Amino acid sequence: MLILHEMFASLQGEGPHTGRPAFFIRLSGCVPPLCPWCDTKVAWADGEKISVDALLAAVERSGHRFVVITGGEPLRQWETGLHELDAALFDAGVEVQYETSGKVPIPAGIRGEVICSPKYLSGVWHVDPVSLSRAHHLKFVACEETVSEIDAFVSDHALNLDRVWLMPKGMHREEQIARLPFVWDHCVKKGYRLASRLHILAFDTKKGI
């Protein structure tokens, strides 16, 4: 059984699949330390139990062949049902993308594409080294105060720039718009890729998008 916060059909608003229609499965719970700027704090709390079969049925009803599994921190439920869902979606020919902080090591046998978003809190990067090597892409929350730390992290770990995405820090549309030019210019300067946050730009703080 998995602990679900919500599921819905939408467009992917971030990263390499920006703008792509998707069915979202948002699992409940996260891993400390928690991010004060998180725009999905509601998913930190307990959700409802749901079976893998019920989730598969929901995906089939949605008609989507691209599923985004996010949180919270979805990989914390790997051993309690997520590995079964991963295998079942793969067997059904459904493409899967995971959104993870990397605080939980990315499993060796995971079949979906993994987008890791390392978190910088209280002067420390909170990410498991295993996650850095297994993630397909790395996505960083960026602002004027954090880009130097991001640059150092990318350099220290010799990350391929084609795997590195920056997105503006901010839970609200106004924050996103205000920081977007700075992050844009920094991506041009350093060779990173820019990740917009389309759902916030379009709907601000509305949930279930």
Image (cartoon, helix red, strand yellow):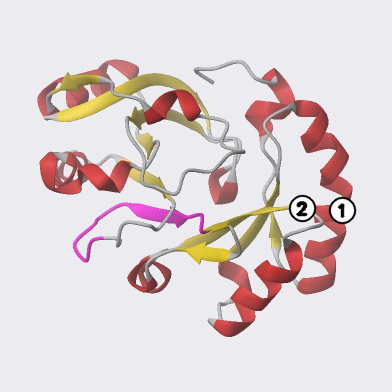
Circle 1 crowding by C-alpha within 10 Å: few under 14, some 14–19, many from 20: some
173 sits left or right of 200 in the view? right
Residue at 21%, 24% (x, y): give it. Answer: 55
Q: Is residue 12 above or below residue 135?
A: above
Q: Is residue 116 magenta?
A: yes
Q: Looking at numbered disc 1 in the image, what kind of residue is underneath it?
A: Phe
Q: Is residue 184 above or below residue 198?
A: below
Quarter of the image for residue 44 reads top left
Q: Earlier in the sequence, mark 1 or mark 2?
A: 2
Q: Is residue 55 magenta?
A: no
Question: What is the secondary structure assignment of the residue under circle 1?
Answer: helix
Of residues 92 and 136, which is closer to you in this image? 136
The secondary structure that dominates the magenta segment is loop
Whole-percent x and y of residue 152? Answer: 66, 77
What's the distance in space between the residues labelled 1 and 2, CA to CA? 8 Å
Question: What is the secondary structure assignment of the residue under circle 2?
Answer: loop
Q: Which residue is mark 2?
A: 143
Residue at 75%, 71% (x, y): give it. Answer: 191
Q: Looking at numbered disc 2 in the image, what kind of residue is underneath it?
A: Cys
- Callout 1 touching callout 2 (CB < 8 Å): yes
Whole-percent x and y of residue 159? Answer: 55, 77
13 sits left or right of 49 in the view? right
Q: On residue 182, which mark appears?
A: 1
Q: What are the residue bounds of the magenta stretch?
A: 107-118
Whole-percent x and y of residue 146? Answer: 72, 60
Whole-percent x and y of residue 21? Answer: 50, 30
Q: Is residue 57 above or below residue 125?
A: above
Residue at 58%, 83% (x, y): give it. Answer: 156
Of residues 16 and 107, which is closer to you in this image? 107
42 sits left or right of 205 in the view? left
